[in-house]
Structure formats: structure tokens, C-alpha cells
Image (cartoon, rainbow, N blue to C red):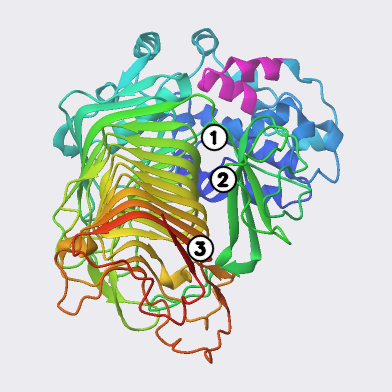
Amino acid sequence: MLEYCKEKYKTVLLPNQMATDGSFPLELKRTKPYGYSLFTLDAMATLCQVYADDTENLFNYQTPDGKTLGLGISFLYPYVVDKDTWPYQKDVMYWDNWPVRHPLLLFGGLAYDQEKYLKLWNSLDADFDTPEVIRNMPVRFPLLWISKEEIRSGGQLTTIGTSDLASKLIASGEVHYSDFGSKGDGKTDDMDAIAAAHSFANQHGLMVKADDEATYYIGGKDRTAIIQTDTDFGTASFLIDDTQVENRTASIFKVSSSQVPYKLEGISSLKRNQEKIDISLPSSSLISVTNSNEMKYIRFGLNQNNGAPQTDIFLVDKDGIVDSNAPIIWDFDQITEITALPIDEKTLNITGGHFTTIANQEESKYNYYSRNISIQRSNVIVDSLEHRITDEGDHGAPYNGFINISKAAYITIKNTILTGHKTYSTIGTAGKPVTMGTYDIIVNRALNVSFINCSQTNDIDDSMYWGIMGSNYSKNLLFDHCTFSRFDAHMGVANATIRNSTLGHMGINAIGSGTFTVENSIIRSRSLINLRPDYGSTWEGKLIIRDCTFVPGGGRPISASLISGSNSGQHDFGYTCYMPEQITIENLHIDDSNHPEDYQGPAIFGNFNPQMKDDSYVEKFPYIITKEVSLKNVTTSSGKELRVSENEVMFKEIKVKTN
């Protein structure tokens, strides 16, 4: 019976009832969400305490996606401290009778060495007599389940065997993977030991260090190591085998916050560029907002779709003042979901590490792999990490970024080396062949993300390999001193800067708004900036290009245009599409010495709509054209002058100023 209960907790109760933020969604939908959430955690904590002497410590058991009893307690704890902060519906009955001395606080406080849980438990009512409260208390006398030795030592401090070793690790301030049984021989699967080391470190606020020169083999087990403390991978190597995996969407490492996201109530609409929202928060936070009743980014082309729900993410301080550098970019007439993600004030540092992915051998279909480092915490620095890829064949499923940054702000990746994946072919949603690739970097719903002094292992001009970086719904992205094959804003970016960098064959691909600045850089793609046609070639704002060199096609003989894109005006993308209102180009050299025989010279704009041959052409969804282009000191190797465009009809109203 004990074995049955343990397995049901591990395989049914914890994975199916708890959400990844530690809440219990099924309980939150009931008429008494607060009381039932308390009951569920009380019952789970009591079950874990029953196994206190078992060889497997259930207090530290973690599902592959990071769910633990400790996560659940940390989610509910603030609302036990102050019930009035409960952001969900109040219980329809007995609201005033909670909380009392809940076992979750006693058992959890001892297991996780959390004095604040124990103090709170000791301060709450022990003499409750309300029948409903008694009925929902799974164990009435939890002290009977606590030994004197446990109380003296602080509870189940560790999963690693003895309290002496746990005490030594806590005293040293750091843990190594070998402390938890890793072999580091490149053959033995060390994932359980790695996850256990981080779990222990997270509970006690300790740094994690990989063992020098170790090679950790990570097989296909469905397991994720949660990083919440500084981690030094050092000179160690990590061999990630993706040839046979249990769960292709499970990250290897997830960098997460101990602070719990929470839903905001009472906000029914938002306006673009709104300066303040009517809320008061405990701390500065990221606000993620969605209106699922309005679709944006309705894609056009070979991978056409019906769009994505209107989405935005922005920063506010504790008084609800919106950061003007990351403004609200849409009018939200309705809000179906709005969540606050507290900003971690302390920076978390991840350094070193040599990672190699043994590529999957699946069919080339859109079954994305996420066997990666997922960063879902604000204020993180990744320094001197390397990622390489081996054993890519003639086909394979794509990857969702080895470094995947989402729902976070103030992230810096520096001195890091990444690798482009092979480009494959598949069938798109329009039923025709399309090229399909993998970004080794994904930035999704993130703000103020910087890549500094980063590069890739393969040739940035080699079209056999897909572009290195893609992003969605992000703001304030920076490349500085980077050598990459690509910058890509997929479903929009607000404000981006590329400086002191070299970009290869896939160049700069962007849609979005704000100011896009390219300075002191070398661009070696077909155009200097490509406004993505599949999302309407829209940039509502300014382009600034200064002190740059443009090498069309990486030196291949092609007709050059600085700004390329396509919009026929016949497709509804879910928003009005704009060309940049103002384009400023200063000190640009176009190295077009190798060009076709019929070359007429470089153009500012490509032919965005070949069908627009005269004024009779009617756009069903008008495309708003650039108003002004300012040129200063633009030179060419061919000696040919810069033209406006091959499409004189489309661009006849544009004012070009030269200095």
C-alpha cells in the first residue's frame, strides 16, 4: 500500500494536479479555492512526511517539468501570511476560518529548512473547532509525525544520505555534481545527480559547481534540472544525447525564479503607450497580457496560418508606472489573461561549460526539440558558454533554441559560442516544400536582452546552415561585437540595436516598431535589412544605419537593395502594415564590386510589389509607405549611384534628402 501511494504521488497527483507555477488549477476553479488549495498541500506534505525514513525522499521528488512539493508551498505561503493578497476568487463559505496550523508549514519548514514556515505555523490557531476546518485537516496532530532528532537537525535536509554531509555542503556554500553521485565519465547518465544537486542548492541558497574536466553524459530521460542559484559549469563538458528521448520538449536546465507569477484582477483594457496602469504591486514586475479574441500576425505564404492571439509584455514598477523604454504596443479592448512576473533584483550568474548536442534523427517535420537551457528568470548573465552540434544527417526535427529566453527581462549572454543547425526541407501549411531550420538562440516574450562578444562555430556565409537567432514578442534586443549568420524578429520586436558586429548570409530580418539601429557593422546578406514578407514587411518607426559596410550576397553577383520586403496590399495580417516612417543612412559603403552584367546600381528599396505598375492598382489593405529617406556619404565599389527602387510607381512620393 505504501508503494502504491508513493507511485501515485509521483506519477498522478503531483504531475496532474500541480501547475508549473506551484498552484492547483482544478482547486482554483472550485467554489472554495483557498481552502481546497490548503487541503491539497496539507495532504501532499503529510504523504511526504510518511516517507521520511524511506530511501527516496519525496519532499525532494521533482517531476520532469520542475514540479515539487516545495514549489507548491512557496506558491501558497504568501497567501497564508496575508490572506488578503489572495488574487483569486474568495471561498463562498468559511473564508474567515482559514488559515490555521497547517501541516504543510510544519513538515515543509523542517524538510526545506525554512524557519519562516515554522514561525508561521507556530503563530497560527491550533484550537480550531469549526467542523468544516476539521473535516479538511488530513492530520490533526502533525507533531506526532516528527521525531526529536528531526526537530533538532532541522528536518530532512538532503536526499544525499547523511545529515553530516548535508551540513558540510551548507557550511561550504557550494555543491558539486559528484556530491550527489555523478560519475562524469561521459558514459554514465548523470542527469539524476545533476538535478538533485540543483534541487539541494536551491533549497539552501548554495552555488553549484561542475567538477573540473568532467564529461557528463545526459541521456534521453524525461528530467529537468532547475537552476535558482549561481552555477559554474567551468571546464566541464555536457554530452546531450537526443537520439532517443522520452520527452523532446523537456529542457535539460531551466533557470527559474523562486518568485511566483500571479494573475492581476480588475484590469479589463489597455491603451497603446499607456503610461500607468491602475495597480499596486509588491515589486517591479513584467506584465504579460493576452487578448485571445483578437488575432495578430496572420501569416502569409508557404507557412500561412490564422494568426496568434494579441500579446504584449512590458515592465511596470510597484506603482504601476510603465517603463517608457518598453511601452505597451497595442490597444487591448479586451483582456483574457494578464499576469505579473516579479523581477528578481539579484543577478544570477551562469558561467562556463562545453555543451554538445548529439542531434536527433527524426523526420524533418515541425516537431520541435527543447532539450536546452531555458531561461525564465529576470536578471541573468550567461558568460563563456559553448554549444556545438554533432551527427546531423540528411534529415532531422528542428530545435527550439539551445539558449531559450522567455518571460524574462535584463538577460545578458556574453563571450558565448553557439552553432547553426543544418537547413532541411519539409512541407509547409500551404502544402508546398519549404526550407526548415533551427535557431540556436530563441528570445520569446522577453525584454532588454543583450548578446555581447558572441559568435558561432560554423561559417556565417554558409547557406547549408540556418540562421543563429530568432525572436518573438520581444523588446530592446542588442547585438554588440557579435559575429552571427542572422538576426530575426519573427512575430515582432520593439526597438533593436546591432553594433560593432558582422552578420552573414541570412542577415537582418525584422518586423515590429520603434527604432532599429545598425551601426559600425558589416552585413553580408542579400539586403541590408529584410522586412519579413510573411508578416507584412511592417516596421512602424525609424531605421538608422550609420558607419556600416554592406556586402550584397556576401560578395556573390546579385542586384543589391538596402531595404527588401514584399506586401501586395491584398492580405489581412491583423494590423495595418507600415514601411519605416523615416530612414537615416550615414557613412555607408556598399561593396558591390562583384555584380551582374546588367547591374543598374544598388537601390534603397527592393521591388515590394511587382504588381503595382501604375496608379490603377488597388490595395485592399493599404501599405503605408516611407515618408522620408536621409542619405549622407553613401559610396559604392561599383561606382554606380544609389537608386530609389526598380518600382518607380510604388515609391514615387518618397522624399530623398542627401547631404
Q: What residue type is disc 3 on?
A: Glu
Residue located 51% across and 22% down the image: 112
Predominant secondary structure in magenta?
A: helix
- Residue 130 visible in the current orientation: yes
Q: Which residues are magenta?
A: 104-122
Element under label 3? strand
Q: CA distance from mark 1 to mark 3?
A: 54 Å
Query: Do residues under tags 2 and 1 come within 8 Å of each other at their CB atoms?
Result: yes
The residue that label 1 is drawn on is 71
Q: Which mark is residue 241?
A: none
Q: Does the magenta portion include 345?
A: no
**77 lies above or below 335:** above
Q: What residue type is disc 1 on?
A: Leu
Q: CA distance from mark 3 to mark 2?
A: 55 Å
Q: Earlier in the sequence, mark 2 or mark 1?
A: 2
**424 lies above or below 448:** below
Query: Do residues under tags 1 and 3 come within 8 Å of each other at their CB atoms?
Result: no
Going by the image, does 356 lie left or right of 290? left
Q: What residue type is disc 2 on?
A: Met
Query: Do residues under tags 3 and 2 come within 8 Å of each other at their CB atoms?
Result: no
Q: Earlier in the sequence, mark 1 or mark 3?
A: 1
The residue that label 3 is drawn on is 628
x and y percentages locating residue 569 in the rendered image = 52, 81
x and y percentages locating residue 273 in the rendered image = 67, 50
x and y percentages locating residue 32 in the rendered image = 78, 45
**116 lies above or below 39:** above
Q: Does the magenta portion include 118?
A: yes
The residue that label 2 is drawn on is 18
Local packing at callout 3 (Cα closer than 10 Å; few below 14, some 14-19, many 20+) is some
**117 lies above or below 139:** above
Between 574 and 399, the one lying in front of the other is 574
